[in-house]
């Protein structure tokens, strides 16, 4: 038994039907005839519907009944004071999606057409009640299909709206691109903002028109874009860097092409992320890191400078105090002249002076190297002779510490061409360091051997204290010493190895070290066998030799000091010739007679003392030479020449055998070391 509902005087009453499938149906019937209403219900129950029904016969009753939900409305076409047309119109006005079937006791095409136009799904004749069940089945099915279609359309509209909203509000620029036609179909607001074009304008421009002819890597933009499009068609959509050209400005981006699945067209979504802000942020971070690194370097340099200045002041004061102390003892007559103590004090003064000069030379040479103004004068040399000169200087120190010294030079090293003074400077730094850090009774080995066809290797090995691996990186660095502070055991400024590295690298060579703590160290230098850096010596005669003029040979390598000396001597009435090196000075000294000569103590190829000794050995050096040390102190403020005789600095010629006495100066020349005043004259 399946309970069904039947209409009786406006009330719902249960009835029963056996062996019929049950389909719930909420049915509203507009019918004035009770018999026709019962007939309709009987047929629908026979068709298997479980009914919940209500019958209305007026517009007011219909309006009230439509407040409840219904699955189907069946209306008689013609009723007293009411009609099926009125029912259809009320359903339309209320925009109800309830299907409606019209029935009529009279047949005819015009009512059927009018009913269908009014929105009825079917028009049935009352005299064919067997059609009621199939018609209701069809109406309910069509209504369900229509509702499903409308729901799908509504969902599609919502999806399109969501898509459009996501497309428009996306944080990156988006383009919809036709992969076959190669045209832009759509662009979001970010793309319009990025490319500075409206949507219609973008649709008329091929994608290649937004890019430069070539990408930053040099490849053509069209060819590279084709590769990325093929990747997208193949299902691969990686991001890639791409540069667009917008109003003449290259815009770096991160671009991605995604193939959109469609049935009739090959579309792609192009996502473009503007990298300018990211690049600016990265540049700011990079510059911040660089500034932080520079700040740390400045702080480290400041610390090293402070250590260097403290160390340098100590290193300078020590020999100066020795010179002043011993000189005062000698000046005050505290030591008998000619006694062994007197000679010892003179030797101490000489040693301290040379040490002080070496310190100053190191600082000035390092400054020259950093300024790129250090000159090299290569010439054929004998390595054995040069190394012998270095070891001769250090022989006393070697003997004091009872150090064994071995020198080994490969015979294959013949025809070496380099700057002899600079090589001796390098060798002196290496050997003196080895002596300093080797305990008494140790050994030192000096070796020179070929290093390939174009270079040779010079190294100094010692059996000293060695260097920890963690400290090797601090070697050859300006102002850095492994021992710092007042408690350090060894003297030094921290410039020797740094200067050595600069000297060697300036000649196309390299330096290095290997060491084992507690066992010793080996410092090496690799230099070209044939140096190519040459400096042309000056051959200019500054003031021509004239009748009756006294001639002076000025040996000076610095152009500024040359000008000052020439000006002073020319104003005093002398003719002047210049020589920039010791070798050139010797050639000129041999070629003619000079009345006087001024010599810089620090010449590129030899010291002033070496030149003076060579001049004394010449047969033609029958005049004493005026030897002036204007070489390094002159660089302090450019004051190489002084206004007149300095009494505190004057030295009797008997104590300075290298002082010349030119002939013919009015009033004669005093047998003292003299200096020239630019205003002229003899003093």
Image (cartoon, rainbow, N blue to C red):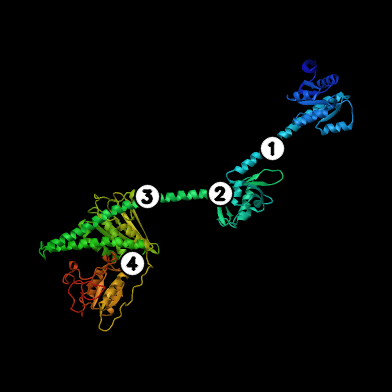
Mark 4: secondary structure: loop
**Spot occupied by residue 373 in the image (x, y as percentages of width and height):** 35, 65
**Spot occupied by residue 192 in the image (x, y as percentages of width and height):** 61, 49
Q: Which residue is mark 2?
A: 274
Q: Which residue is mark 1?
A: 156
Q: Which callout, 3 or 4, points to the residue nearer the camera?
A: 3
Q: Which callout, 4 or 1, points to the residue nearer the camera?
A: 1
Q: Which residue is mark 3?
A: 296
Q: Which callout, 1 or 3, points to the residue nearer the camera?
A: 1
Give the left or right position of residue 362, taking residue 663 as reference. Answer: right
N-terminal-most mark, 1 or 3 = 1
Numbered circle sitting on residue 419: 4
Numbered circle sitting on residue 78: none
Between 287 and 85, which is closer to the camera in this rendering?
85
Q: CA distance from mark 2 to mark 4?
A: 59 Å
> Is the residue under label 4 in contact with that under label 2 (CB below 8 Å)?
no
Between 406 and 544, which is closer to the camera in this rendering?
544
């Amino acid at each position: 038994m399946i309970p069904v509902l039947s209409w009786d005087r406006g009330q719902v009453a249960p009835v029963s039907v056996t062996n019929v499938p049950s389909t719930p149906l909420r049915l509203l019937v507009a019918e004035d005839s009770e018999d026709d209403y019962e007939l309709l219900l009987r047929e629908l129950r026979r068709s298997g519907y479980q009914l919940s029904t209500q019958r209305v016969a007026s517009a007011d009753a219909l309006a009230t009944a439509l407040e409840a939900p219904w699955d189907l409305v069946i209306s008689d076409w013609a009723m007293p004071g009411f009609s099926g047309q009125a029912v259809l119109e009320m359903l339309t006005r209320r925009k109800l999606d309830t299907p409606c079937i019209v029935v009529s006791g009279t047949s005819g095409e015009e009512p059927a057409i009018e009913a269908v136009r009014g929105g009825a799904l079917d028009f049935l004749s009352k005299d064919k009640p067997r059609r009621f069940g199939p018609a209701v089945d069809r109406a309910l099915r069509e209504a369900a299909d229509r509702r499903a279609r409308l729901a799908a359309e509504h969902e599609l509209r919502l999806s399109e709206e969501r898509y459009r909203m996501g497309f428009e509000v996306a944080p990156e620029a988006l383009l919809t691109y036709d992969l076959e036609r190669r045209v832009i179909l759509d662009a979001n607001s970010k793309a319009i903002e990025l490319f500075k074009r409206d949507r219609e304008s973008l649709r008329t421009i091929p994608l290649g028109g937004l890019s430069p002819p070539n990408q930053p890597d040099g490849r053509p933009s069209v060819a590279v874009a084709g590769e990325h499009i093929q990747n997208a068609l193949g299902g691969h959509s990686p991001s890639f860097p791409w540069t667009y050209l917008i109003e003449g400005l290259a815009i770096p981006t991160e671009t991605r092409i995604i193939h959109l699945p469609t049935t009739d067209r090959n579309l792609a979504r192009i996502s473009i992320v503007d990298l300018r802000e990211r690049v600016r942020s990265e540049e700011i971070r990079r510059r911040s890191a660089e500034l932080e690194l520079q700040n740390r370097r400045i702080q480290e340099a400041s610390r090293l400078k402070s250590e260097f200045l403290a160390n340098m002041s100590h290193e300078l004061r020590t020999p100066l105090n020795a010179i002043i102390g011993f000189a005062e003892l000698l000046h005050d007559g505290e030591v008998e002249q000619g006694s062994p103590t007197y000679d010892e004090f003179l030797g101490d003064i000489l040693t301290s002076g040379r040490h002080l000069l070496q310190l100053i030379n190191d600082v000035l040479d390092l400054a020259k190297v950093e300024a790129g103004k250090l000159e090299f004068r290569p010439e054929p040399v004998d390595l054995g002779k040069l190394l012998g000169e270095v070891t001769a200087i250090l022989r006393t120190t070697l003997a004091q510490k009872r150090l064994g010294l071995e020198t080994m030079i490969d015979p294959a090293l013949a025809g070496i061409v380099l700057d002899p003074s600079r090589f001796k400077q390098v060798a002196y730094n290496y050997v003196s360091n080895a002596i300093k850090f080797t305990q008494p009774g140790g050994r030192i080995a000096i070796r020179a051997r070929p290093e390939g066809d174009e270079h040779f290797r010079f190294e100094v090995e010692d059996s000293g204290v060695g260097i920890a691996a963690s400290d090797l990186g601090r070697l050859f660095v300006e102002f850095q010493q492994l021992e710092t502070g007042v408690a350090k055991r060894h003297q030094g400024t921290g410039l020797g190895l740094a200067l050595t590295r600069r000297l060697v690298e300036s000649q196309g060579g390299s330096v290095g070290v290997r060491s084992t703590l507690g066992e010793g160290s080996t410092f090496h230098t690799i230099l070209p066998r044939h140096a190519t850096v040459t400096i042309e010596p000056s051959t200019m005669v500054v003031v021509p030799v004239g009748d009756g003029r006294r001639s002076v040979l000025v040996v000076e390598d610095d152009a500024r000091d040359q000008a000052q000396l020439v000006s002073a001597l020319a104003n005093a009435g002398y003719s002047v010739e210049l020589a920039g090196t010791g070798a050139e000075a010797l050639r000129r000294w041999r070629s003619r007679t000079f009345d006087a000569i001024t010599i810089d103590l620090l010449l590129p190829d030899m010291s002033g003392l070496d030149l003076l000794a060579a001049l004394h050995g010449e047969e033609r050096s029958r005049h004493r030479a005026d030897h002036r040390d204007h070489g390094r102190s002159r660089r302090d403020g450019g004051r190489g020449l002084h206004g007149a005789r300095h009494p505190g600095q004057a030295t009797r010629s008997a104590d300075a055998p290298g002082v010349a006495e030119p002939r013919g100066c009015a009033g004669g020349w005093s047998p003292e070391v003299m200096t020239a005043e630019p205003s002229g004259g003899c003093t």
